[in-house]
Image (cartoon, rainbow, N blue to C red):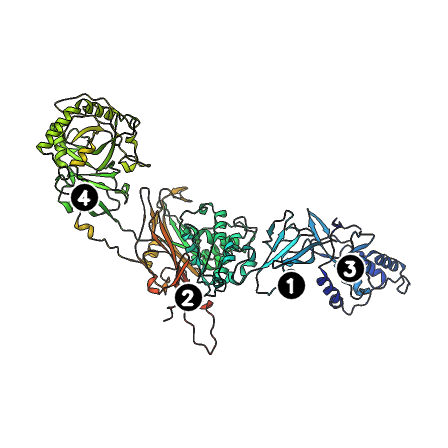
Amino acid sequence: MLRGIFPSPAAVVGRGGRTVMAAVAENVAAAAEDQEPQGEAVPDLESQRLQIENKETGRDRPLQAGESWFLVKQPWYKQWEVYIQGGDKDSAAFPGCINNADLFEDQVNWRLKRGLVEGEDYVLLPEAAWHYLVDWYGLEHGQPPIERKVVELLGIQKIEVYQVELLLVRHSDMETPYTAQFSHSDSVDLILRTAREQFLVNPEEEARLWVKKAEGSFDRLCNTRVTVLEAALQTGQLVVMETRNKDGTWPTAQPPTTNTASEEDKEFQGQPGICGLTNLGNTCFMNSALQCLSNVPQLTDYFLKNRYLEELNFCNPLGMKGEIAEAYADLVKQAWSGHHRSIVPQVFKTKVGHFASQFLGYQQHDSQELLSFLLDGLHEDLNRVKKKEYVELCDAAGRPDQEVAQEAWQNHKRRNDSVIVDTFHGLFKSTLVCPDCGNVSVTFDPFCYLSVPLPVSHKRVMEVFFVSMDPRRKPEQHRLVVPKKGKVSDLCVALAKHTGVSPERMMVADVFSHRFYKIYQLEESLSSILDRDDIFIYEVSGRSAIGDNSREDVVLPIYLRERTPARDYNNSYYGLMLFGHPLLVSVPRDRLSWDALYHILLYRLSRYVTRPSSDDEDDGDEKADLEDKDSIPKAGRVAGGSSQDSGLEQAGPSCGVAGGSRAPADNSPGPAHWPQRARRKHLFTLQTVNSNGTSDRSTFNEDTHGVSFRSQPYIAIDWEPEMKKRYYNEVEAEGYVKHDCVGYLLKKAPVRLQECIELFTTMETLEKENPWYCPTCKQHQLATKKLDLWKLPETLIIHLKRFSYTKFSREKLDTLVEFPIRDLDFSEFVLKPQNESAPELYKYDLIAVSNHYGGLRDGHYTTFACNKDSGQWHYFDDNNVSPVTENQIESKAAYVLFYQRQDVARRLQPQPSSSEPPASPACGSPPSS
């Protein structure tokens, strides 16, 4: 009866190479004795036939995957059938003991002959039938049983007679392969155990396997729980075993620079865990997060003791195929080997970028964001739940909190069970109340870290420059305290207290690249003004306003420009470049003429513009008379040209013309009826321009009595280079003074960490963008929400929300948060009924801090961490590691805090012997020098 033999005649048979099969043969007698039923009489011949050939335990039973069948030489079995059919126990047809010698190539390696055919050379018997025959007739002394497994291939169950023969070698000795044979149903772990036994690898040494592909490349056999069939291993393939080096590295993963390392570095032996991480280019955020996580004692022990190997989840669709966990394990083992001053986390960085595209490249990122990704990735890669079941979230519905919380935690563990859950996960109580019907919804949700807000001040400090109408006064720098959600008028009121000038006589403008980027209205919000903006507040007459024809005075924006010869082959026209600070000047409407405007501007510029003497005026008049015919047409051409006509008017920011992406918000053209002419003056000429400071192309009708306009006019004061050099004092023009208020620093009062936690648990109203659907009202509501702590984890991560993002602004809060090094007590925040006899369940000690120095656009991350072995605090700054004292840890840079529960610290602390003094806490005070 054929049983679907694998068609692999070239395969080499046997359960192993020479060593394995020889051992089996030598001990077969003892093994057979253990398997034989003791004290049973040999049944009669008919009973033997029924037991061997029945459909339950005999040859006719159906195949089942994973069970064992045995080969028996066909002539022996044929003789046994003749003996049974004869019905005479004393017949000469007695077959004798089972002898399979003819099925083997030799009696040393006990390899099965090639090309054997079922029914002609052998028959297959199930395990029970085999043991019956061995019990009744015995097995030839020294012969091993020929056991084969039932495997399932393409949905069909077959008995594999010829197994997969693999060549096992050690990475350190590739020249002497060891031949071993495995069933398709054997696990890769059996291959690894066989290799470890053959190459005498110590149990504490970590090993892994590589298989050589047909094209010559090598692939990792990552998942040792899969079968030989699932791993697609074939006869003749080379399997390489490598063991981890003492320094935590793998022989196949040595960096190119290792060979050039000095002997001193190779022989380095330091404190485990005191190891820097190389900055690969803006990767300080990653280094900081890794150093914090590496100093969580129970997590690091989990990896150092190889407990992760049994829990790697390679089939989790939410995971990273175990690659993140393995890459992190490699880092931990290297850092805690004590053989490195610093390591290069290049492989880990590549893995992170592969599975999280936001971390690709070398841009700066947030250490907390990477930490969140890493914890989630490690959890899914190490999730003990191989197949997640669907769990429906249930509301409290009036049930006791204890019952609902326990149900929620059990449901969470049904889908999420890993060392990350054991170490970092806690439980929230979330309470939502509908403002309309009063419906209360209570749910319990897991958390991995607390993101606590910092108490935000409602005040804001702004620096401005005040420009007085008095030309003799230099601009004054002021530091003003205003409401964070205030208006521009509040800024003027605050400045009025310093200057005595009425807020009604102030105009606020944002100056950028020698022009007005924006002129603000009093009712505009201060949130639209960024801290980096250059804000000028100009004093104007109380009777004036921009663009208001009803006022007696009009405010004119004034730009300063300098003529420069254009780079043209015949120098037929001039370019104009902005320079200096623009002005807002009040001009009486009844004096709005070119001549009056010239004298008003000359007066406003008198602090840094020297009036010409009578001799200078005569020289100027003569030159003007000589050049009158040429200068005015030239000026007219420049004034009438656009930015496209004149190349120098499109110059970059260094020339005083706006560059980059920032352009003035007001692009209104000049007045429709302003005289478009460049009248000859002693020092400068006047020109109407647009808000960019480039000449206006509109046509104007001259009015000798005055000027009327329909839109906002901008005036440019155009200087000839020689006149500017002669009469314009650039040093004086750029000068300013600092008001006394600039010297005063607004001290921010420090806040306690407990205040941040209280703020986290404060009731709040949901925002319009995130409403809650009330099942009673059947509509979305802006419900009130309150979060409370119910269950705390072994290691609590507290993220201080220092970065604030709004529609108009982004800022970093540099408030000093005072956090305790020891005895952070959460008993007042936990709602779950507490165990009064175990207060350490609610007290935490600090073990690590991730720091961020700098602002939003740039910054640097470092770490303070307490070594779990020595109890000494160290400062990790990329490659550099240095010891620190506890009073250096608290700073404004603290960003992510790691706390360990005290009962866990005591549990992990090694128990001293009776002769040794009690050990200090894991992260106690540093030893005195």
For label 1, the residue is 197
Number of the front mark, 3 or 4: 4
Report the quarter where the C terminus lies: bottom left
Circle 1: element type: helix
Q: For marks 2 and 3, give the CA distance.
A: 61 Å
Amino acid type at mark 4: Gly
- The CA span between labels 1 and 3 is 32 Å
Identify the mark nearer the N-term, 1 or 3. 3
Reading the image, the residue beneath label 3 is 129
Q: Are marks 2 and 4 in contact (CB under 8 Å)?
A: no
- Residue under label 2, please give it: 902
Q: Earlier in the sequence, mark 2 or mark 3?
A: 3
- Find numbered disc 4 in the image and state the secondary structure of the residue it sits on: loop
Question: How far apart are the alpha carbons under marks 2 and 4?
Answer: 61 Å
First-in-chain label (1 vs 2): 1
Which of the two discs, 2 and 4, sits closer to the camera?
4
